[in-house]
Image (cartoon, grey):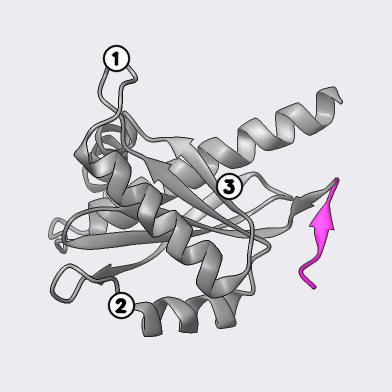
Amino acid sequence: MPSTICGIPDVSLGFDYGQRRVGIAVGNAITGQAQPLDTLTHHDGIPDWEALAGLIAEWQPGALIVGLPLNNDGTIQKMTNRAQNFMNELRGRFKLPVYAVDERFSTIEARERLRSARASGSRGKRLAKGDSDAMAAQVILESWLMGTINSSNQG
């Protein structure tokens, strides 16, 4: 069984689910930080479940965190239902807790982080197609970690 810190899984995986790709990040409850891990391409619209299973086996997360795409006003959109289906499939396949996080501005934040990293020289000028997806997964996961850590400290 995965270990926890104050009831929070010490390792979690975050997902930025899109139509063509899913960005993945790994996070740590001790630091409240995450890092981009990988981006997997869908095959005929279907996630690469075998690769996902491999990452889950490797990292042994205690929770899976999925960005929930919403319109700017908080209403659902077509991708909201797809992300919810992805969450249900994760829950069914891997028997782990799955949590949703509002991801309305995660892609903008991810692109800004990548732009800043390039400008500072800590990241090369060339980016792969999935770099912003994995970085968005990092933003989503850090948002969940900070919210969960803050709520456990208040309880």
Give the mark nearer the N terminus: 3 vs 2.
3
Rendered image quadrant of residue 155: top right
Horizontal and vertical percent position of residue 90: 48, 65
Residue range highlighted in magenta: 1-6
SS state under label 1: loop
* Mark drawn on residue 7: none
Query: How dense is the environment of label 3, judged by Cα within 10 Å: few (below 14), some, or many (20 and up)?
Result: some
Q: Which residue is mark 1?
A: 73
How far apart are the alpha carbons under marks 2 and 1? 32 Å
What residue is at 72 percent from the left and 36 percent from the top?
A: 149
Q: Can you tell which mark lies on residue 33?
A: 3
Q: Whole-percent x and y of residue 120?
A: 28, 43
| Residue 63 horizontal/vertical position (percent) | 63, 58
Secondary element at tag 3: strand
Label 2: which residue? Answer: 48
Q: Amino acid at mark 1?
A: Asp
